[in-house]
């Protein structure tokens, strides 16, 4: 009987040891990718957590809403975004500024005395209508944006555009074909082709007076190559070149818009021999073959000083 009692005590001790949590069983504390942030009205912010979040909430949904960690700025103010996992809750204080806040764009004024838009939102176009000589933007009649062989897909285009408003911008995502390409095309015989030839001739005659403006933003490290007016002799590159072209720079990949003015004086000789006798690829975009690379473009236009 005494031996059985000792055996029972030993089993109880073994059970106690087996139930004691090890380091692997300890609960990981919830952490968020940000504890504070500033966004503009209409802009989004993605919060991530190190564990699965059971619920996301906003204390002021009239200022900022949150869905699965994606915060949307609704109106000016400050909202507290909470993430709950089990019994643990962490917060991020989100300040929402007016549409033109944050130092990104903030004006509908474009450069130059005369403008030929390729990508331009409606608000900016209307604000600068007196400057517009002619528009090269797609019209679904004889001016198109063609994605070549499904090499890009449409992107989400979150947040404000480069001119500081919520009108949207062009966003393309590299697919799985192994290369990518798209172009703003003018059909043969359309009135815009006559305008394009006249603009080319004006540039060649007075190259110091003309520029190509564009804005770009990214959070990945993809390289982007561009050329214009139907000749790849005008190629320029943002990032590491992979098939020639003049390197502009490798812009900062922080999700902010960066504006560039490409002087046509660098390309006057190439444009002088450009074949514009038929339809033309007015502005071409190439982003390599790495799937998932995103090209965000806005405010693309030729202008005269």
Image (cartoon, rainbow, N blue to C red):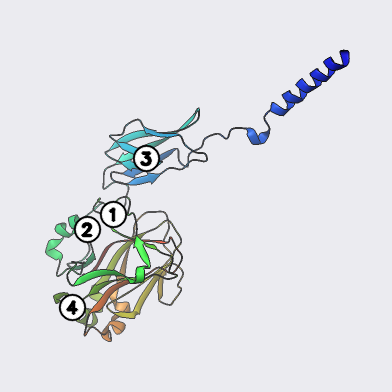
- Residue at image x 38%, y 33%? 57
Q: Position of residue 258 (x, y in %)?
A: 35, 59
Query: Disc 3 designates what residue?
Result: 67
Q: CA distance from mark 2 to mark 4?
A: 22 Å
| Labels 4 & 3 near each other (Cβ < 8 A) | no
Q: In the rendered view, tell whether residue 265 sits above or below residue 258.
A: below
| Mark 4 vs mark 3, CA separation in Å | 46 Å
Q: Residues within 10 Å of mark 4 (few under 14, many from 20)?
A: many
User: Residue 193 or 102: which is nearer the viewer?
Assistant: 193
Does the rendering let one see residue 57?
yes
Q: Secondary structure at mark 3?
A: strand
Q: Can the viewer see residue 304 in this picture? A: no
Labelled pair 2, 3 in contact (Cβ < 8 Å): no
Q: Which mark is residue 193?
A: 4
Cα distance between the residues tagged 1 and 3: 22 Å
Dot 2 crowding, Cα within 10 Å, few <14, some 14–19, many 20+? many
Q: Earlier in the sequence, mark 4 or mark 3?
A: 3
Q: Name the outermost residue toward the bottom.
A: 273
SS at badge 2: loop
Q: Mark 2 or 1 closer to N-term?
A: 2
**Quick one: which residue is furthest to the top in this view?**
1
SS at mark 4 in the image? helix
Q: Name the residue at 42% across, 38% down.
A: 36
Residue 294, by quadrant, is bottom left
CB of mark 2 within 8 Å of CB of mark 1?
yes
Residue beneath label 1, please?
161
Q: Locate residue 260, reporting x and y percent.
A: 32, 65
Distance from disc 2 to disc 1, alpha carbons, whole Å, reads 8 Å
State the CA–CA distance, disc 4 to disc 1: 28 Å
Residue 11, image x, y percentages: 78, 22
Q: Is residue 30 left or right of residue 295?
A: right
């Amino acid at each position: 009987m005494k031996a059985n009692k000792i055996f029972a005590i030993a089993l109880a001790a073994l059970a106690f040891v087996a139930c004691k949590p090890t380091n692997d069983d300890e609960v990981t504390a919830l952490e968020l990718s940000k504890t504070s942030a500033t966004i503009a009205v209409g802009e989004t912010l993605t919060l991530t957590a190190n564990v699965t979040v059971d619920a996301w909430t906003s204390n002021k949904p009239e200022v900022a809403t949150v869905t699965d960690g994606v915060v949307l700025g609704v109106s000016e103010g400050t909202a507290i975004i909470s993430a709950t996992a089990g019994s643990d809750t962490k917060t991020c204080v989100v300040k929402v500024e007016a549409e033109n806040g944050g130092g990104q764009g903030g004006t509908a004024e474009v450069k130059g005395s005369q403008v030929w838009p390729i990508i331009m939102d409606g608000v900016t176009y209307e604000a600068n209508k007196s400057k517009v000589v002619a528009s090269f933007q797609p019209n679904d009649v004889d001016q198109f944006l063609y994605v070549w062989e499904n090499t890009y897909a449409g992107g989400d285009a979150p947040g404000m555009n480069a001119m500081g408003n919520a009108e949207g911008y062009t966003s393309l995502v590299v697919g799985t074909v192994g290369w990518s390409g798209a172009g703003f095309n003018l059909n043969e015989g359309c009135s815009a082709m006559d305008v394009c030839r006249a603009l080319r001739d004006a540039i060649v005659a007075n190259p110091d007076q003309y520029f190509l403006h564009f804005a770009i933003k990214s959070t990945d490290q993809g390289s982007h190559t561009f050329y214009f007016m139907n000749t790849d002799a005008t190629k320029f590159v943002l990032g590491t070149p992979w098939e020639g072209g003049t390197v502009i720079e490798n812009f900062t990949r922080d999700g902010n818009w960066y504006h560039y003015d490409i002087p046509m004086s660098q390309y006057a000789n190439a444009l002088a021999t450009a074949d514009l006798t038929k339809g033309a690829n007015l502005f071409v975009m190439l982003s390599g073959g790495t799937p998932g690379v995103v090209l965000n473009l806005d405010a693309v236009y030729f202008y005269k000083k």
